[in-house]
Amino acid sequence: MLSTQDETAVKSFLKISKDLIRRKKRYIEPRTYDINGKKVNYKQAIIDIGIINKEDIWKYILELNEEDCFDVSFDRNLKMDTNSEIFEFKKVINGKDVYIKLTYRETNQGLVVCLSFHEDSKERRK
């Protein structure tokens, strides 16, 4: 369960993010995930969920609500040194539990970054 402070942060983040997404101020970080011991690149991960067009990711993110968020933390990527918050969500998409990790990056107009969008791993479901 999120703290009241985190709930407020999630509400604010979703409001700002959804506005930025609608204005196409968004970016999908091309990553490779370790899902249940198997290396999967981000394109294959969305196909495995049943999403053909990666732009559809944003449609699902626009559907997120505060209750879908289970964790708020600071960015652990020390190379980036952005000191930004990371918002982690779970949502059922096409009958699969999907893990979604988002953040906000400061640019001249702001940018929502999707760091992860893949089927939730068995380890995380415990």
Image: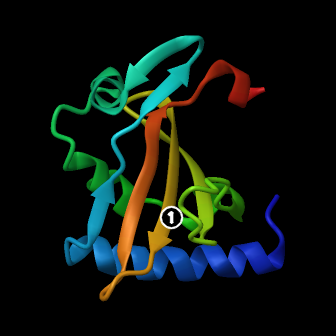
- Image quadrant holding the N terminus, namely bottom right
Residue 87 is situated, as x and y percent measured from the top left of the image, at: 60, 60
Residue 66 is situated, as x and y percent measured from the top left of the image, at: 60, 67
Residue for badge 1: 103
Residue 38 is situated, as x and y percent measured from the top left of the image, at: 51, 11
37 vs 91, nearest the viewer: 37
> With respect to residue 125, does 40 lie above or below?
above
Q: Residue at x 50, y 64 (%)?
A: 103
Left/right of residue 24 with respect to residue 5 in the rendered view:
left
> With respect to residue 32, does 4 lie above or below?
below
What is the crowding at mark 1: few (fewer than 14 residues within 10 Å), some, or many (at least 20)? some
- Image quadrant holding the C terminus, namely top right
Left/right of residue 96 with respect to residue 41 in the rendered view:
right
Amino acid type at mark 1: Thr
> With respect to residue 49, does 16 lie above or below?
below
Query: Which residue ends up furthest to the left in the rendered image?
Result: 53
Query: Which residue ends up furthest to the top in the rendered image?
Result: 37
> With respect to residue 109, does 39 lie above or below?
above
Q: Residue at x 40, y 61 (%)?
A: 113
Residue 21 is situated, as x and y percent measured from the top left of the image, at: 28, 70
- Does dot 1 land on a helix, a strand or a loop? strand
